[in-house]
Amino acid sequence: RGRTPRAPRMVVYGGIHLLAEDDDDDLFGQRKSTDRVTAPTSVYLPPRRAWFSMYNQRVTVPVSPAEAARRRKLGLIQRALSDDMMLEIFKRMSPVAVARAACSCRPWRLLATHEDIWERAALDAWSGREPPEVTARVCRDRYHNSWRRMFLDRVRMRTEGLYVSRNTYIKAGMTDLTTENVNPVHMVCYYRYFRFFGTGEFYCKTSPHKLESVAKTFRDRRASAVDPNMYYGWYSIADVDGEEGPDESRLHLECAPVERLTGDGRASSSLHMWLRLRSTHPGGSNRLDFVKLASVDEAEPVPAPTAEEWREIDDPEMAYRRSCGINVRRYVGHARVRELSRGLNTMVFVPWEDVHDHVLNQETDKMDFFVTG
């Protein structure tokens, strides 16, 4: 059927573009009439759909009255984030932060017992000592496949702070010539600082300065490397003669060799320390007891402590006498193997966030002796 050709014309309604010379069948299968003009809105606009009104609208899912009452008791962050998202956040937090969050409310306390949280924390805690396969085997064989129980019961070397010991002793002073019958004494106070790393390394330093000033150096590895009074070395599990199987709480620390002046010239010597790691509460690992401290020249045998010396460290009376400086032996500086009996107080772990407010920062006029538990 012939028709007169028309010029192209474009009609735009509702974002739909149609050309006049397109097919006679429109989008909806209707035949265009050439005899009468139809309103474009009824031809080119689609009919209204019921679900169009739901776009960009937040629909509330109906819940039971008990569930609605439970949600009203939750905090804003708990209503905004699901338990799965909070679990992923807890897995990336430190164990101390997880324990603090568990004290805030009951839902987080239950969430903090999830095994996935403690699995990641346990693998990170012992990554420097053993591969993940060994850690998983220890968890399965000794702790009934409970990562949380292993993290709380198994001792570990903490790396998020410093181990500090405060040592004091009485030193006789010089008599004042203007005063009669006076025997002055002085209270001498100094500290031992240790920082451990997950790679098996450690830094240590003996200093008269308080904790809050020394912590700045230990937090910066570059500043620790250039400090002339800083010792560094490696730590491992100590072997004890006459006992089967290693004890993870017994540690042997060996510092890098340094040169010292002797009567025959210069000699290379290294510092050896034997420590016992323990906890005052589950998961603490916050005490280091000195068992023995010796400086050994090169090519000399290392005087490792015996099994009896390891057992003596459990005697609380001996630990108290050591903290007070009783039964201190004289130091022989010219010997090739020199054992030190002074400054062997128990070390306390101090996290980085507590270095400015810890009790170890007090002066001697407020705290003369510091005895740890």
Image (spheres, rainbow, N blue to C red):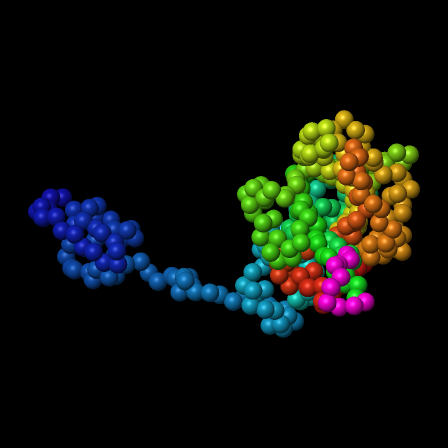
Q: Is residue 55 above or below residue 251?
A: below
**Which quadrant is the C terminus positioned in?**
bottom right
The spot of residue 202 in percent (x, y) is 67, 42
The spot of residue 248 in percent (x, y) is 79, 41
Nearest the camera: 242 or 259?
259
Secondary structure predominantly adopted by residues drawn in magenta: loop
Residue 126 showing in the rendered view? yes
Count how many numbered circles sit on residues in the image. 0
Residue 222 occupies which quadrant of the picture?
top right
Residue at left offset 88%, top offset 38%: 306
> What are the residue bounds of the magenta stretch?
171-181
* Residue positioned most to the top: 299
Residue at left offset 63%, top offset 43%: 230
Residue at left offset 72%, top offset 28%: 264
Residue 307 lies within the magenta run: no
Nearest the camera: 354 or 147?
354
The spot of residue 303 in percent (x, y) is 83, 35
- Say whether residue 160 is left or right of residue 247: left
**Which quadrant is the N terminus positioned in?**
top left
Residue at left offset 11%, top offset 44%: 2
Residue 307 occupies which quadrant of the picture?
top right
Residue 174 lies within the magenta run: yes
